[in-house]
């Protein structure tokens, strides 16, 4: 029984890792794009982006998962995702990437707007373009500032991957919970906690190492 449980949890954890990695891969660049939109000088775009970010940050991720997966079929009569496991996974990724990109966008925006305006003005005096100022002056300082809050969101993402079970994506929590129904045992759920703790611990160490590497750059 122990080997069966361990094998099932390991397979589920691989799915959780896949969700985690793909979410970061999509949300990190998309978050930066959304941040630029929220800082746009074109007011209609700025207000629209801020409204979307407010809605996404103000509603539960679980609700967004359910709406994105079931919404097209119930509202439009056309289930874009289909009933397959790949369709459910695609819907989950859309929800996760968009949700976390909105959170990341606010972190980016705070980091960018926290840079003193005098530095941009100094770059302009030196003849640098806005693009050169961003990449050569602003960006490294922004990275330094956003690592701690981004780290918090990354750790939260590890645990949020368990939410995909509401649309029947078989990650580690789903697999652990299944043993309650099939075998009447609860201890596999405690083992799922060990998986989460181990991965979160590794990420904490990695993020701490990144912060130390950036200590040379004082802000």
Image (tube, rainbow, N blue to C red):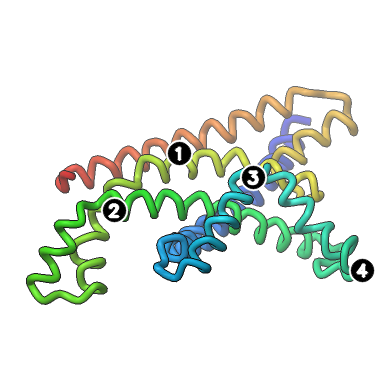
- Of circles 1 and 3, the one toward us is 1
> Residue at position x 7%, y 72% from top?
126
* Of pointers 3 and 4, the one earlier in the residue sequence: 4
Front residue of 160/135: it is: 135
Q: Quadrant of the C terminus?
A: top left
Circle 1 sits in a helix, a strand or a loop, which is it?
Answer: helix
- Residue of label 4: 77
Q: Quadrant of residue 176?
A: top right
> Could you classify mark 3 by the number of other residues whose Cα lies within 10 Å: few (under 14), some (14-19), or many (20 or more)?
many
Where is residue 129 shown, x and y percent of the image? 20, 76
- Of circles 1 and 2, the one toward us is 2
> Residue at position x 51%, y 49% from top?
103
- In the picture, the disc for residue 142 is 2
* Of pointers 1 and 2, the one earlier in the residue sequence: 2
- Of circles 2 and 3, the one toward us is 2
Vertical order, 170 against 76 (above or below): above
Question: Image check: 178 left or right of 217?
Answer: right
Question: Image check: 181 left or right of 170?
Answer: right
Vertical order, 16 against 32 (above or below): above
* Of pointers 2 and 3, the one earlier in the residue sequence: 2
- Of circles 1 and 4, the one toward us is 4
Q: How far, Cα to Cα, is label 3 from label 4?
A: 28 Å
Q: How far, Cα to Cα, is label 1 from label 3?
A: 15 Å
- Residue of label 1: 152
> Residue at position x 74%, y 42% from top?
8
* Of pointers 1 and 4, the one earlier in the residue sequence: 4
- Residue of label 3: 161
Circle 3 sits in a helix, a strand or a loop, which is it?
Answer: helix
* Of pointers 2 and 4, the one earlier in the residue sequence: 4
> Could you classify mark 2 by the number of other residues whose Cα lies within 10 Å: few (under 14), some (14-19), or many (20 or more)?
many
Where is residue 193 shown, x and y percent of the image? 62, 29
């Amino acid at each position: 029984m122990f080997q069966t449980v361990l094998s099932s949890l390991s397979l589920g954890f691989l799915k959780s890792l896949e969700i985690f990695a793909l979410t970061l891969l999509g949300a990190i660049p998309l978050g930066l794009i959304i941040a630029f939109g929220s800082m746009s000088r074109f007011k209609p775009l700025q207000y629209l982006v801020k409204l979307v970010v407010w809605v996404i940050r103000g509603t539960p991720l679980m609700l967004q998962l359910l709406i994105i997966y079931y919404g097209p079929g119930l509202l439009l009569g056309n289930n874009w995702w289909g009933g397959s496991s790949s369709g459910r996974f695609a819907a989950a990724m859309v929800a996760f990437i968009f949700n976390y990109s909105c959170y990341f966008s606010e972190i980016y925006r705070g980091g960018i707007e926290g840079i003193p305006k005098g530095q941009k003005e100094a770059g302009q005096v030196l003849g640098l373009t806005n693009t050169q100022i961003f990449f050569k002056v602003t960006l490294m300082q922004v990275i330094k500032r956003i690592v701690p809050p981004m780290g918090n969101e990354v750790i939260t993402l590890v645990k949020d991957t368990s939410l995909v079970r509401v649309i029947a994506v078989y990650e580690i929590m789903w697999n652990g919970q299944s043993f309650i129904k099939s075998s009447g045992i609860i201890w596999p759920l405690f083992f799922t906690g060990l998986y989460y703790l181990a991965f979160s611990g590794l990420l904490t160490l990695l993020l701490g190492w990144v912060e130390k590497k950036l200590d040379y750059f004082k802000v």
